[in-house]
Image (cartoon, grey):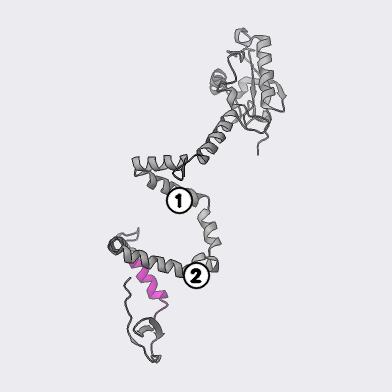
């Protein structure tokens, strides 16, 4: 983890002898990276252009002074620039003395406090808290705004869902969840939950039978027509697997008029049962 150390610095262009003074106080502040390949090359566009043309070796670091807080580093930089009048001093690249930066200036608001929180972040946290706590018709501002966005852009929900799935896969969330609910830990395996899920499914299908049959038809069509790179559909692959792994091979269905039971071929049929399977219709 990078060391957060606000600091003031002076660098000098070797060829011309001109200086540039500044301070670094963002969360990435680390004096060890100053004027290093891949490190911090000041915020000056002019210095950056010279480095891009001649490389970081065109400058040498003359001074680094470390501070405990960002504001102290910034204040020291301001006092130094004003003392040498850098914006009018031909020996400096600086185009200002920090005299235009006020408390409400965007640059000043980027300075972290002793806890590493900037003014922008404080504002964001306050706004987020307000939007969560402000409830209208049982919904907070975030929820209301999201519903409006969905109504205006029906594709937004699909895009967000897809992105969420991709993020979870990337972070291994699905693997962690699978481990957590594997086997007996799966809540749906508990008798009370299994019964509730089953009853809920039966109720939904009975109340929405036409919609359910339509969805089933689409699923069946997809399973039977869409092929993979080997030219096999899902049903094709299932058939191949079942030929080798079918756990019901060598068994038959029997029923007692209300429930089904599978027994091995050749076994005697219990009293009250007959061959065949009752097809359940929800």
Q: Position of residue 35 (x, y in %)?
A: 63, 25
Q: Is residue 240 left or right of residue 85?
A: left
Residue 87 in percent (x, y) is at 60, 10
Is-magenta flag for residue 94? no
Q: Find disc 2 in the rendering and name its residue.
A: 192
Nearer-N-terminus badge (2/1) = 1
Q: Which residues are magenta?
A: 234-250
Q: Quadrant of the C terminus?
A: bottom left
Q: Main secondary structure of the magenta part?
A: helix
Answer whether residue 42 is visible to the viewer in this image: no
User: Can the viewer see residue 118?
Assistant: yes
Image quadrant assignment for residue 207: bottom left
Label 2's element?
helix
Is residue 40 shown left or right of residue 259?
Answer: right
Residue toward you, 102 or 144: 144
Residue 11 horizontal/vertical position (percent): 65, 19
The quadrant in which the N terminus is found is: top right
- Nearest the viewer among 254 and 195 is 195
Which quadrant holds residue 66?
Answer: top right
Asked if residue 241 is among those painted magenta in the image, a careful observer would answer yes
Q: Which residue is mark 1?
A: 165
Classify mark 1: helix, strand or loop: helix
CA neighbours of label 1 inside 10 A, class few (<14), some (14 to 19), many (20+): few
Where in the figure is residue 164, as x and y percent of width and height?
Answer: 46, 48
State how far apart marks 2 and 1 are (Cα): 30 Å
The vertical placement of 253 against 166, above or below, is below
Residue 231 located left or right of residue 110: left
Residue at horizontal 50 percent and vertical 49 percent from the top? 170
Picture mark count: 2
Farthest front residue in view: 137
């Amino acid at each position: 983890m990078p060391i957060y150390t606000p600091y003031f610095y002076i660098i000098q262009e070797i060829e011309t002898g001109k200086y540039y003074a500044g301070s670094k106080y963002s969360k990435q502040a680390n004096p060890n990276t100053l004027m290093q390949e891949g490190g911090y090359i000041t915020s000056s566009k002019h210095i950056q252009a010279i480095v891009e043309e001649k490389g970081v070796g065109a400058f040498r670091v003359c001074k680094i002074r470390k501070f405990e807080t960002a504001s102290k580093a910034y204040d020291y930089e301001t006092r130094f620039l004003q003392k040498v009048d850098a914006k009018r001093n031909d020996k400096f690249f600086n185009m200002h003395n920090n005299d235009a930066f006020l408390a409400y200036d965007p640059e000043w608001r980027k300075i972290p406090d002793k806890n590493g929180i900037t003014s922008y972040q404080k504002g964001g946290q306050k706004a987020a808290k307000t939007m969560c706590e402000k409830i209208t018709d049982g919904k907070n501002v975030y929820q209301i705004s999201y519903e409006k966005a969905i109504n205006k852009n029906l594709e937004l929900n699909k895009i967000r869902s897809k992105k969420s799935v991709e993020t979870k896969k990337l972070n291994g969330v699905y693997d962690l969840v699978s481990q957590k609910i594997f086997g007996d830990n799966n809540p749906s395996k508990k008798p009370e939950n299994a019964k509730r899920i089953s009853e809920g499914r039966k109720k939904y299908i009975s109340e929405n039978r036409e919609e359910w049959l339509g969805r089933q038809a689409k699923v069946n069509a997809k399973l039977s027509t869409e092929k993979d790179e080997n030219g096999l559909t899902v049903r094709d692959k299932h058939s191949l697997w079942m030929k080798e792994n079918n756990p019901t091979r060598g068994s038959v269905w029997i029923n007692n008029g209300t429930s089904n039971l599978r027994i091995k071929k050749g076994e005697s049929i219990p009293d009250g049962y007959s061959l065949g399977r009752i097809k359940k219709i929800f």
